Amino acid sequence: MKKFILLLCFVLLGVNTHAQLSQPQRKAAIKEIVDRIQLPKIPDYTVSITKFGAKGDSVSDNKKAFDRAMNHLQKRKGGTLIVPKGVYTVNGPIHFVSNVNLHLEEGAKIRFGDDPKNYPLVLTSWEGTMLYNYSPLIYGNELENNAITGKGTIDGEGGGAWAAWKQLEDKDKQLSREMNHSGVSIEKRIFGEGHYLRPQLIQFVNSQNILLEDVTIEDAPFWCVHLLKSKSATVRRLKFDAHNFNNDGIDAEYASDILIEEVEFDNGDDNIAIKAGRDHEGRANSATPSENIVIRNNLLKGLHGVVIGSEMSAGVQNIYVENNKASGYLKRGIYFKTNPDRGGFIRNIYINNIELQKVEDCFYITANYHGEGEGFNSKISDVFISNVTCEEATGTAVVIQGFEQSKVENVKLTNIKVNRTKNATSITNTKNVIFEEVIIGEEATVPTSVSGKE
């Protein structure tokens, strides 16, 4: 094991050009974001899904019951739809209307079918490219005041027929990216039958005032929760048990004013990923970066903990990651990823008070993530990481990889302790990287003497 220690201040290159927020300023910025987020306003009307013919017997198809319930609530201008204890099979998507809370009582499970023919095409996004594809299993577009709450479970049945599509998706994935790069209009980006792009489990598009609280999420076909072009959303106390291909926990894309707190993650992919569109399309939407996002008091477990990218071409800024703790293995604790295709920026990122257990890499900031082109270097700057402990990094404690023409700039790590690691650091193409009170490996105490010579 290589031992590495940096105490006081170690400046790798340059002069600081961005004023780091003080602790009171950071707390004030977080409070301002949280205070701005509005919880959904749900009318005081409650009805059970059983009133519309639903049966929680695990066999009956309840798709029509949920359709009838949503139509009824739309006429009533909203309310709370109760799902009692039982297993409710739904062969097709649940499409929300505004002003509705879907409340799953303890012991209730909504289990979705996996026949693609039951999922009509809707406007969605797939890995950062807007297109028309199979509907997410729970979907809302251009809505406000929506909630999914309660102690029940939402099961995406992603390990069945959907999982087989992972091996078939490459042609369609590449087609979607070519459409993005060549500027094909979204209306002509039609996927669905004959194509193999898996749908998300829960997705809200162009929506606001959203609450996801207390439910358990299992086995999505693709990403679990996708907040796309949405704002003013609270995700609180969810539990994830999702281990299928690409089962990210929460993806916030072109999203603003988002609070993610007290969530228990156990995912097969990224726990939390902040995104902002891919390549040409993302850069064309630079007026809507992902910004003003607070991530606090979560338990992290899965592939990677908190991720920015790789789809981030519209930019990501003003992200506050506070008081999060690993509850098990993560490959990478904090992971920023981009490439020469992306453009955009990552800036004003504050990460404070993180406890990691065994990881491959504690912090990994890279401009070398795989891509298909060049000429659009992202700008990564003003990243402040403080008060982090890590038991062991089997790879490298700190990796920062910039572009030769566009260096990663203004990164400060303060009060970092990594107990054991294979490699200490790998830092290339950077400017103004500062280590302050950083110990990687065993802490040096006093110098040893050479007998008879000192």
Image (tube, grey):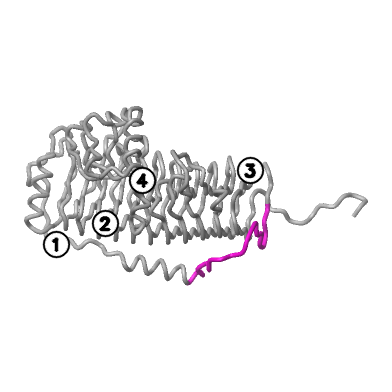
User: Is 136 positioned to the left or the right of 56 in the image?
Assistant: right
Residue occupying the far right of the picture: 452
Pointer 3: what residue? 423
Disc number for residue 43: 1
Identify which amino acid the numbered label 3 is placed on. Answer: Asn
| Crowding at mark 1 (Cα within 10 Å: few <14, some 14-19, many 20+) | some
Q: CA distance from mark 3 to mark 2?
A: 42 Å
Q: Is residue 451 above or below residue 112?
A: below
Disc number for residue 249: 4
| Crowding at mark 3 (Cα within 10 Å: few <14, some 14-19, many 20+) | many
Question: Of discs 1 and 4, which sits in the foreground?
Answer: 4
Q: Position of residue 259 (x, y in %)?
A: 35, 59
Which of the marked residues, 3 or 2, is nearer the chain's N terminus?
2
Question: Of discs 3 and 2, which sits in the foreground?
Answer: 3
Which of the marked residues, 1 or 4, is nearer the chain's N terminus?
1
Q: Position of residue 52 (x, y in %)?
A: 7, 45
- Report if the CB atoms under discs 1 and 4 are less than 8 Å apart: no
Pointer 2: what residue? 211
- Residue 9 sits inside the magenta stretch: yes
Question: In the image shown, does 157 or 130 lie closer to the viewer?
Answer: 130
Identify which amino acid the numbered label 4 is placed on. Answer: Gly
Q: CA distance from mark 1 to mark 2?
A: 15 Å
- Report if the CB atoms under discs 4 and 2 are less than 8 Å apart: no
| Crowding at mark 4 (Cα within 10 Å: few <14, some 14-19, many 20+) | many
For the magenta stretch, what is the residue range?
Answer: 5-24
Query: Image point 13% across, 39% down: which residue?
Result: 63
Identify which amino acid the numbered label 2 is placed on. Answer: Leu
Q: Is residue 427 above or below residue 17?
A: above
Q: CA distance from mark 4 to mark 2?
A: 15 Å
Which of the marked residues, 1 or 2, is nearer the chain's N terminus?
1
Q: Looking at the image, can residue 109 be seen?
A: no
